[in-house]
Image (cartoon, rainbow, N blue to C red):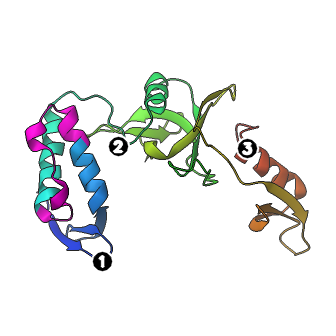
Amino acid sequence: MQTKLQISTNAEQRLFVISTGEGYSCFGFDNCYRHALQLSQLLGRPDLAPKENEIGELKQYELYQNLVRLAGDADIGTYFDPGTPTQVREILERYLNGSPLRLFFGDDVTGRDWLEEHDVYGYIRRSMGPLKVPLLTGRLSGGGSAILTANVVRILDGRTLTELYRHPTYHQASFTIESCSTKKYKAQVLADGELHARFPTLVSAQRWVAFMKGETIRL
């Protein structure tokens, strides 16, 4: 039996709060508006386009849910986050069920790399459900993590390390490796002068920096 969702709003944090009775999830007011607008465009339903003056109202979340249901009945292909660059969309589609990719995530406006080290290397698959979003999975994995496609700021081919995409203003912190003397750690990495990570050996610190720069495939 399907659990009925209970929706409330948190105006201070600009969030819809969704409860199933067993837990909670949140969906930002502005994010809801952007997704609803994109879905209405993909479906060719301007009559269902959300109104800016209704951002944050429960009826806009209900409109979004209705658009998701309609999308599930239509063939809209792979669903990307609003604001995903065309080149990123094309690369993810091209590598769907193909070779692995190394993804870099960051600020979609400034192009600054967030220095994410987990869930950044794998194979592109599509999720199930009404909105078939891109997933990053292991070679034999049937599931994976949803890709924040609007925040992809750099892409490398996961086998050759050939750069396929770079945000127009992509930039990354400057790394410095220093020695440190503790029982557990012998090296540490500074990012733009601030401590970012510690490592048991100098070699492991060097490997981490090389991976973060996209010079090696794996940590």
Of residue 12 and residue 149, the one placed in the foreground of this image is 12
Q: Quick check: 126 left or right of 42?
A: right
> What residue did someone put label 1 on?
12
Against 43, residue 180 (above or below) is: below
Q: Is residue 129 left or right of residue 80?
A: left
Q: Nearer the viewer, residue 65 or 138?
A: 65
- The label nearer to you, 3 versus 2, is 2
Magenta stretch contains residue 41 = yes
Q: CA distance from mark 2 to mark 1?
A: 24 Å
Q: Secondary structure at mark 3?
A: helix
Check contact, mark 3 vs mark 2: CB within 8 A.
Answer: no
The stretch in magenta equals 38-58
Q: How many numbered tags mark residues here?
A: 3
Label 2: which secondary element:
loop
Q: CA distance from mark 3 to mark 2?
A: 27 Å
The residue closer to the viewer here, 51 or 149, is: 51
Q: Which mark is residue 213?
A: 3
Q: Is residue 90 visible?
A: yes
Q: Residues within 10 Å of mark 2 (few under 14, many from 20)?
A: some
Please tell me whether residue 76 is drawn above or below residue 35 in the rendered image: above
From the viewer's perspective, is 66 left or right of 107?
left
**Vertical side of 19 occupied by 176: above or below:** above
- Kind of residue at disc 3: Lys
Task: Say whether disc 2 or disc 1 marks the residue closer to the N-terminus.
Answer: 1
